[in-house]
Image (spheres, rainbow, N blue to C red):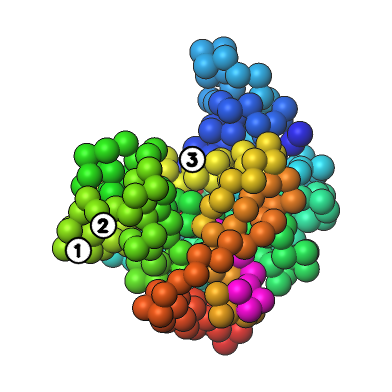
């Protein structure tokens, strides 16, 4: 099993590190455009192998796509990250060119790969990759909801003073500060609605903190986060390679589901060896449906920038 991670920066390297530690593949290839960068990151990680006890081989390459040949899963993180005050959407022009070029190069060498797209603005990048690659829709999957849902559970866990692992909570919609939808009504602690434990005001604050979760970290770090994004990407890769059938909110191409078509945005999907295999219908109420439609309008407006 070979897995490629494109972009050896903060998110890509963290993702590759998690993949190696979990031994999800015999080989991980890191590819970056910056001379020597991926090679350096790979060598540094390989020098942790005997300390951490993993046997995955990590190699790096500067833009030599032949080294990625035969990859079964490819994670795309190449592109610019946010700086403080920037929205994910402001990255569109630069990252669109990067993601399209990278995805096409990868496909030439790995025609059977499943693509996990992380570069921002992620929903638009996933849509762009899906259209450019011409692959079956289940083989292109955007990572956003896995991270946002993890942040949602973190803030819920803090508010409830409980383990986040005991919570089920999902963020759907677009992967943007104003477009994501933390589904507070459906969040549960051991099957009990969290509204039994938290008042409406607190729940509202948890949702608001979740939505600006990435921006808060960008403000603190001076660039966007990497530990949780990298771990979220690796968790999705794990679900694919181990055929786990885990449910992650992920950006996928919709054809009428959740009332939307010709768009990629976050909905709960089953992830397994075929990529995303099935969309779960959460049966949204009217308010949630309206929020999803509004979120879709914003994502679609972003997609339209590509064709302008
Ligand atoms: P970074 O700047 O640390 O790494 C990006 C890497 O991409 C750099 O090493 C750069 O040399 C490389 N790169 C640029 N153009 C390339 C090309 N044509 N081919 C190969 N490599 C290329 O950035 P970071 O923090 O790793 O973020 C990467 C992307 O992920 C950004 O767009 C960021 O906004 C996005 N992101 C998405 C998240 C999500 O939930 N979907 C969460 C966090 C970040």
State yes or no: residue 254 in magenta.
yes
Examine the rendered structure and indicate whether residue 273 appears above or below residue 269. Answer: above
Residue under circle 3? 231
Which contiguous range is marked in magenta? Answer: 250-257
Q: Are marks 2 and 3 in contact (CB under 8 Å)?
A: no
Could you say which disc has been placed on residue 195 in the image?
A: 2
Q: Residues within 10 Å of mark 1 (few under 14, many from 20)?
A: few
Q: Is residue 117 visible?
A: yes
Label 2: which secondary element: helix
Name the residue rendered at 28%, 61% in the picture: 207
Check disc 3 and report its element: helix, strand or loop: helix
- Indicate the secondary structure of the residue bearing disc 1: helix
Relative to 142, is 75 above or below? above
Q: Which label was assigned to residue 200?
A: 1
Specify the quadrant that holds the N terminus.
top right
**Image quarter hosting the C terminus:** bottom right
């Amino acid at each position: 099993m070979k897995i490629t991670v494109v972009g050896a920066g903060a998110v890509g390297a963290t993702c590759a590190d998690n993949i190696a530690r979990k031994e999800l593949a015999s080989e991980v290839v890191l590819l970056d455009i910056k001379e020597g960068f991926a090679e350096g990151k790979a060598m540094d990680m390989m020098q942790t192998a005997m300390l951490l006890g993993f046997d995955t081989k990590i190699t790096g390459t500067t833009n030599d796509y032949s080294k990625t040949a035969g990859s079964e899963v490819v994670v795309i993180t190449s592109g610019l990250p946010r700086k403080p005050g920037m929205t994910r959407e402001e990255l569109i022009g630069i990252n669109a060119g990067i993601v399209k070029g990278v995805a096409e190069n990868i496909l030439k060498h790995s025609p059977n790969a499943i693509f996990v797209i992380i570069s921002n603005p992620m929903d638009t990048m996933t849509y762009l990759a899906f259209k450019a690659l011409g692959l079956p829709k289940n083989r292109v999957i955007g990572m956003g909801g896995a991270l946002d849902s993890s942040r949602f559970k973190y803030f819920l866990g803090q508010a409830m003073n409980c383990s986040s692992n005991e919570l089920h909570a999902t963020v759907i919609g677009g992967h943007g500060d104003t477009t994501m939808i933390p589904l507070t009504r459906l969040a549960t602690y051991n099957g009990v609605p969290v509204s039994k434990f938290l008042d409406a005001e607190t729940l509202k604050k948890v949702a608001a903190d979740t939505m600006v979760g990435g921006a808060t970290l960008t403000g603190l770090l001076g660039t966007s986060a990497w530990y949780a994004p990298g771990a979220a990407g690796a968790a999705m890769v794990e679900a694919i390679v181990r055929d786990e059938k885990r449910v992650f909110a992920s950006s996928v191409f919709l054809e009428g589901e959740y009332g939307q078509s010709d768009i990629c945005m976050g909905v709960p999907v089953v992830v397994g060896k075929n990529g995303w295999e099935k969309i779960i219908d959460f049966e949204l109420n009217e308010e949630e449906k309206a929020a999803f439609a509004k979120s879709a309008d914003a994502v679609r407006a972003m997609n339209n920038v590509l064709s302008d």
